[in-house]
Image: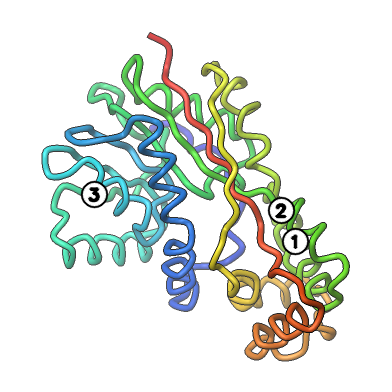
Amino acid sequence: MATPLDTNAYPLGTADIEHERLVRQAAWVAPHTERLFRRAGIGPGQRVLELGSGVGDVALIVGRLVGPTGEVVGVDREARSLARASARMRELGLSWVRFVQKDVVELPAHELFDAAVGRYILMYVKDPAAILREVARLVRPGGVIAFLDTSFQSFLDACQDLPLWRDAARVMTEVFWRNGADTEMGKHLSAAFVGAGLPEPETETYTLTGSERWMSDALISLQPQIDALGIRREQLGELGTLQERLMEEARAQGRAVPLPEMVGAWARTRG
């Protein structure tokens, strides 16, 4: 059996509260995700591999794009999340979307995919180029590889003049960094594609409009990690009321809510 590729732990966990957060987050980023996949050429009848399925939101988008004449195979290591993803697809009648609990290196290459996609996956991987090389092994020549990931820098810059936002962002990013996550993976996607031997990708950058709850939601899911790592968060007060106080601070200063960017990248495998 192939040796699984090395990944960092997912710091947000797999509790029900995190599953619900993922569903809310998916609603905020779905328009950008669908836009990228359409621009990359994903459409009816295609067979698509989806990495890091979680509770199934990206697979849902792809499933609707490829339709019943296509197929979506979602891959994830976490059984509990995949059980929920499978149940959601059954409820929605998307019988052509299925999930397998495997590492990407364990997938056979004899049935090639027309495309491979992922969102917020590579930021948790120790060697993103290695993952993309494995993905390219599974995609037919001329097929599509499309990934989206985050970029925190403009968000962190926007928080600097808002003390509560700045403190909350510091706590959140410290957890990510100490777990090995790359909060600038969106900006590093092009280098990862090229490092995997793929053509330099086309890219787009999106701002997560409408996702004002994003940071407070994430901090609630991150609380076990915050406590385990001994990160001081007294200045944030009760996390359950943090969202209201963050919004009040932004309104008091007449500021827009700081939000991270998401970067999408896509390329076709070499023929």
252 over 192 or under it: above or below: below
- Amino acid identity at mark 2: Phe
Q: Is residue 63 above or below residue 238?
A: above
Classify 10 Å Cα crowding around label 2: few (below 14), some (14-19), many (20 and above).
some
Whether 241 is drawn above or below 268: the answer is below
Is label 2 or label 1 in front?
Answer: 2
Residues at badges 2 and 1 in contact (C-beta under 8 Å)? Answer: yes
Label disc, if present, on residue 173 of the rendered structure = 1
Picture coordinates of residue 101 (x, y %)?
Answer: 33, 50
Residue 174 placement, left or right of 16? right
Judge from the rendering whether residue 256 lies leftward or rightward of residue 164; answer left or right: left
The 10 Å Cα crowd at callout 3, few under 14, some 14 to 19, many 20 or more, is some
Mark 3 lies on residue: 64
Q: Residues within 10 Å of mark 1 (few under 14, many from 20)?
A: some
Q: Secondary structure at mark 3?
A: helix
Q: Nearer the viewer, mark 1 or mark 3?
A: 3
Q: Position of residue 187 (x, y in %)?
A: 68, 38
Q: Which residue is mark 2?
A: 152
Judged left or right of residue 69, residue 6 is right
